[in-house]
Amino acid sequence: MVLESKIPEGPLAEKWSKHKFSLKLVNPANKRKYDIIVVGTGLAGASAAASLAELGYNVKAFTFHDSPRRAHSIAAQGGINAAKNYQNDGDSVYRLFYDTIKGGDYRAREANVHRLAEVSVNIIDQCVAQGVPFAREYGGLLANRSFGGAQVSRTFYARGQTGQQLLLGAYSALSRQVATGKVKMYTRSEMLDLVMVDGKARGIVTRNLVTGQIESHSAHAVLLCTGGYGNVFYLSTNAMYCNVTAAWRAHKKGALFANPCFTQIHPTCIPVSGDYQSKLTLMSESLRNDGRVWVPLKVGDKRKPEDIPEAERDYFLERKYPAFGNLVPRDVASRNAKYVCDEGRGVGSTGLAVYMDFADAIKRDSLKVIEARYGNLFEMYEKITGENPYNTPMKIYPAVHYTMGGLWVDYNLMTTIPGLYALGEANFSDHGANRLGASALMQGLADGYFVIPYTIGDYLAQMPYEKVSNDRAEFKDAEAKVKETINKILSIKGTRTVDELHRELGLLIWDYCGMSRTKEGLTSAREKVRALRNEFWTNVKVVGTNEEFNQTLEKALRLIDFIELGELMILDALDRNESCGGHFREEFQTPDGEALRNDQEYAYVAAWEYEQNMHAVLHKEQLKFENVTPSTRSYK
Amino acid sequence: MNLNLHIWRQPNGQSAGRMVEYNVKDISEEMSFLEMLDVLNEDLLRKGEDPVAFDHDCREGICGTCSLVINGRPHGPYTTTTCQLHMRSFKDGETVYIEPWRAKAFPLVKDLVVNRSAFDRIIQSGGYVSVNTGSARDANETPIGKEIADEAMNSATCIGCGACVAACKNASAMLFVSAKISQLAMLPQGKPERKRRAEAMVAQMDAEGFGACTNTGACAAECPKSISMSNIAMMNREYTSAKLTSDAV
């Protein structure tokens, strides 16, 4: 298989404009003849569904939530980047492009990233026009702040609830189209398979989560906007329902899965408190603007943080990275927190935490200013931990937060299956091996508002208007297979609960394919994950029936895909004999412990083809850097 | 700690429901309320019994999915979402009653899960600014005073959980609806459609079967995002002035 990235020719800054002109158009009167399925209604899905419906296409939008407004995009706190240069501090489209490529540790496509930076400015305009109440200065203009990995202030925000406000903006645009009848909304409806007709994506099979009804839906194209796979780790900052099932089922139908081992560990989360823990809560990275990260200088120092004098504290990020200090990229901040905890200098009851201290910021800017900046985050922290961060430093620890890997897509966001697109976190395309803060919201909305409305026309213009009926054998076969899988799971009646098995998977992946990886560990983990898959198919316990609201069955159907994906992550991490971004192989580091990238041999996108029993086949897309020269990231 | 739970069980909207008693043991006070229910459900599963269905997702207080009435109060004893309630708020040996949102406009799905799509239909009736993708002008060409932006943000923080409806003796959705009407009426972007919006959203709210507002303030008292009653006053002004100068929706 040859991976055609379809990156347009020409100078970097002109590629997207030229490409938009060269794409085929669908006549306005003909758009109503095409149906498009959008799976997922987060930032990418809601913005795509609304924008495509505005153009005149018939959209069917699916979410497993009770309402499109619940998608996990809503939980993004910090902000959204855009190269507006409103602050006159030297920002530009090219700088945002450069920062993103560099932040991604040179494992993303130049052309995609430049397009992302270009449309970033339109996103802010669009959101403001929708009534998104971004933070403003007294003069009435938009406020910005800086964010990890950047030296300019280009992040737009709405208190600590930027994701919520952007999602509600996209949701309102979607709701408007539902009212016009151009979008048909299916809630509590989960995609369980992709249906192909003559080699093209032509529909999906869904399960109605309330009645258990297995249904199929046909269309001319299918968009997967189904988010990331961070819940493979069981504990992550993702919402409980986030899953890889839609993407994985598409993968099993032939869509290649790219860079699965590129997962992002977020440095500032509330530490784990016990075995019952169901999820981890992120504290926005924006806190690193004012919070100073430290641990005691001495191993085993159990004094209260306020009793440890300045001279006996180690502000390890400021010490090791004087230029960026507490604002180093996420992977660097996370790994260093792990190191100081491994040295025995971690704090809190588990020793798996570091302090983030606001005392100096409060002294410098006043309590009032800090409260205005982070009030709701501090409140959230206090609710969860029972500690007041105005008086005592926060305790934080890294947790899985985002997955850069995802379905392989070309420049048009099409996967290797014709007619199947992947948008937002579900694709692999823009963040390389590491995502910069405030760039996930940007990418989700860029794909949905400003990329897919152009690129999908090029495909549809070559498609006949004829609809395919979901009575066809392809649909009936897919439905039968889904029912067979469900019946099989229900008939096992074993002894292990779904959550138990999921926790076990999560620990395996966290220990062996988390912040730091080794060949030996990965090899042993692969066997363990395979054994776990076997355990699932022979010993899982799911009660009840399919024909009811059955949350245990929902979880079981998601878990089996996570188990298979976990193995693919391990394969990918084993293949990549280098350290870059979120992927840190202990065998490949510099003498002072920094990541050692290998551009000679590994400047490629690893795209995996599904084969029976997880004997995945690797395809490589070589990355070309024509505008930036890959350099070693240095934040010192 | 050990707790005595009384939980509403109802297989679906068509069957009758009842309170069922459960005891949970060795609950840590660091657990969240939903993690305590996870423990109960794991026990039930091991015994081969049907776990208690409840809605939840982000577990960080922002998605608005979780929805439990705990000891008679939506989201429990504090103004927070259920997922942000921790067991340190309860005493060892306490009896806790757990019920679903109860409102005609929120039909029951199973146990503690209800259908809140009425809220979506209210937003679909007018809770938006009509602006197509790509037609926006530069964001800074519309200056908005900080005070107004902050006020609009206060209204916009509504998470659509429905606690206001569950708290109200009339099952009124006025707080939810008014928060969206106020947010958009305050901002210059929302002004062209403010009359049509107020009329349409109020009409849809009534059509969904939500009750009237009698100003008891139970909604605002229970709102996990502190949406203020002043939104309702603003909605009433918007609605009245729209009706008086009607565009006749």
Image (cartoon, grey):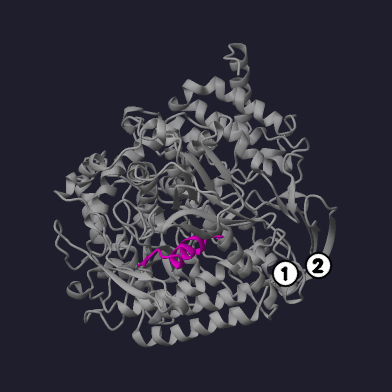
Within 10 Å of disc 2 (Cα), the crowding (few <14, some 14-19, many 20+) is some
Give the vertical position of A458 relative to B238 (above or below).
Answer: below
Towards the viewer: A160 or B19: B19
The residue indicated by pointer 1 is: B40
Q: Residue at x 80, y 56 (%)?
A: B10
A306 left or right of A438? Answer: right
- Depth check, front residue: A574 or A58: A58
Q: Position of residue A231 (x, y in %)?
A: 50, 66
Q: Position of residue B100 (x, y in %)?
A: 74, 51
Which is nearer the eye, A568 or A66? A568
Q: Position of residue A125 (x, y in %)?
A: 35, 35
The secondary structure type at the circle numbered 2 is strand
The answer to which of B139 and A197 lies nearer the viewer is A197
Q: Looking at the image, which residue is at 52% across and 49% down?
A: A218
* Drawn side of residue A159 relative to residue A326, left or right: right
Mark found first going from the N terminus, 1 or 2: 2
Rendered view: B136 above or below B103: above
Residue A630 x/y as whole percent: 17, 65
Specify the quadrant that holds the C terminus of chain B: top right
| Chain of the residue under the numbered disc 2 shown in the image | B
- Residue A391 appears left or right of A313: right
Q: Is residue B166 magenta?
A: no
Q: Are marks 1 and 2 in contact (CB under 8 Å)?
A: yes
SS label for mark 1: helix
Amino acid at the residue labelled 1: Leu
Provide the residue designation for mark 2.
B22
Residue A383's place in the image compared with B28, above or below, is above
Q: Residue A604: which quarter of the image? A: bottom left
Chain letter for mark 1, please. Answer: B
Magenta extent: A240-258
Q: Amino acid at mark 2?
A: Tyr
Image quadrant containing the N terminus of chain B: bottom right
